[in-house]
Amino acid sequence: MNVALAKSPTGQPVGELFAAARGRLPGTGPVAELRQAAFDDFARRGLPHRRIEEWKYTDLRAQLREVAPLAPAPDQAALTRAAKAVKSLGIEGTQKLVLVDGVFAPQLSDVAALEAGVQVRALREILEDGSNQVRADLLRTTVASDAMISLNAALATDGVVIDVAAGVAPTKPVHIVHVATRSAQSAATRSLVKIEKGARVHLVESLVAAEGARTYQTHDSIVIWIGDDAELQHVRLMEDALDAANITTAIFTVGANAKLNTFNLTHGGALSRYQGFITLAGQGSELSTNGVNLLGAARHGDTTFVVDHAVPNCTSREVFRSVLDGRAHSVFQGRIIVRPDAQKTDGKMMTRALLLSDEAEADNKPELEIFADDVTCGHGATAGALDESLLFYLRARGLPEKEAQALLIAAFVGEAIESIADDNLRDFAVAAAERWLATRD
C-alpha cells in the first residue's frame, strides 16, 4: 500500500495536529470514538493524489501538501473583522448564520429573527449533549468515502444544524456565511439541513475572507435531506482569498416528488474542490444542478458531482461552465448512475469551457453508468475560445476590448446562472460574477 501521511506546516505528522486539536473538539464517548476512527482512516489513506481516479486532476499531495493546524476559537478582534466581512457582502434580506474560523457566532447571526418553522442549533451544542444518543451520527457519512471526508469528520469543530418544519415556506433565504480571519490556519465545519415534507426553502452559502486573512484552508461538509414534496433552491458562492484552499463536500438526499435546484459559483481560492453526492431516493424527484468556475492566474477549481438515480421516474439536468484566463485550470467530473430498478430515468449533463489564454487548461470528464434499459440519458463536453467574429462586431460598435469580452463571457455563463429560479438568489450570483469580471487583468 502506498501511503503518504499529510504533514503540518511545521513538518510534524498530521497525527500530532489531531492530538493537539483534540482538546477543543466537541463530543466525548461515541463522538470521540468516531473522530478517532475517521482520523485513522485519513492517516491510512493520506492526501488524495492523481493515482486515485476521482482525484486524478486534483493532486492534493502536490497542490495542498500540508494540512494547516486548526484556527483557535475566534476572539473579539476576529469577530469584529468577521462582522466587517459579512457587511461587505452586501446581501440583504436573508436570515444569516455566521461561522467564524469554523465556530458558530450567534452574535453575528440573525438567530432572534428566524422565521416560524425554522430551527437552528450549533453542531457543537448537539455533539456535547451527552443525553443525545445519536449525536455521533451527525459526523458519519455513508454515501461516499474518501480521505478528505474522513478528515472533516475527525476535525469538525462546529457548524449549524437547521430544521425546517413540514409545509413551511420561509419568505427569506437562510444564509450560511463562512468567514476566515486567520492566516495559514484551517477551519473544519459540518452543517446539516433537514427540510421536512412539503417545505419550500431558499438556502445561500457564502465563503469569504476577512481583511488580511491569507493562505488559510477550509475543510467543509454540508449534508442536506429533502423530504417528500419539498423544494430547495441552493446557491453557493465561493469567494475565498485568492491564495486560500477550500475542500468542500455536499451530500444531498432527495425524497419523492421533491425538487432540488443547486448552483455553485467559484471565483476565489488558489485551490478548490467542490464535490457533491446527490441521491434521488424518491420517485418523481427532479434535480437541476449548475455551476460556473471563473478562474484566472494559476488558480485551480475542481467541481466533481455524482448523481445517483436510485429509484424510477426521476429527472436530472447538469449544466456547467468554466471561464479560464492566465494559467488557470478547471476540472469538471460528472457521473450519472442509473440503478437497475431506476427505469424511466431522464438524465443529461453538459459542460463547456471558455479559454481566454493559450496556457489555460480545462479537463472535462462526463460519465454515465447505466444499469437499467428503459432510460433517456446523455452527456456532452466542449472547449473553445471567444468567438472572434462576435468580438469584432462588438468592438466595431465602439466597445473597448475588455468590455466586449465581458459581455460575451456574461452571455456564456448566463445559461447556468439563469437556472436559479429565485430572482434575489440569481442577483446574488450575478453580482459575484460581475465582481470577477471587474477585476480581470
Image (cartoon, rainbow, N blue to C red):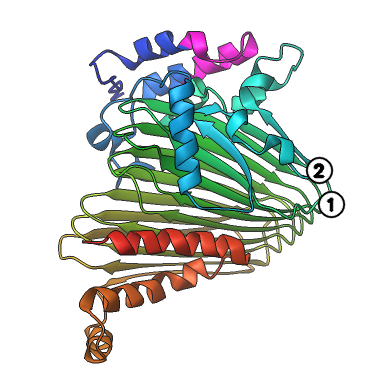
Q: Earlier in the sequence, mark 1 or mark 2?
A: 2
Q: Specify the amino acid type for callout 1.
A: Gly
Task: Say which residue appears at 57% left-offset and 12% top-offset.
Answer: 32
For the C terminus, which image quadrant?
Answer: bottom left
| One can see residue 44 in this view | yes
12, above or below 99, in the image? above
For the N terminus, which image quadrant?
Answer: top left
Front position in the image: 257 or 339: 257
Residue 215 circle label: none
Residue 439 belongs to the span the image colors magenta: no
Q: Name the mark nearer the viewer: 1 or 2.
A: 2
Name the residue carrying label 2: 117
Name the residue carrying label 1: 167
Front position in the image: 9 or 334: 9
Residue 35 belongs to the span the image colors magenta: yes
Task: Say which residue appears at 31% left-offset and 34% top-offset.
Answer: 212
Task: Say which residue appears at 36% left-offset and 44% top-offset.
Answer: 272
Which range is magenta? 22-38
Q: CA gap, disc 1 to disc 2? A: 9 Å
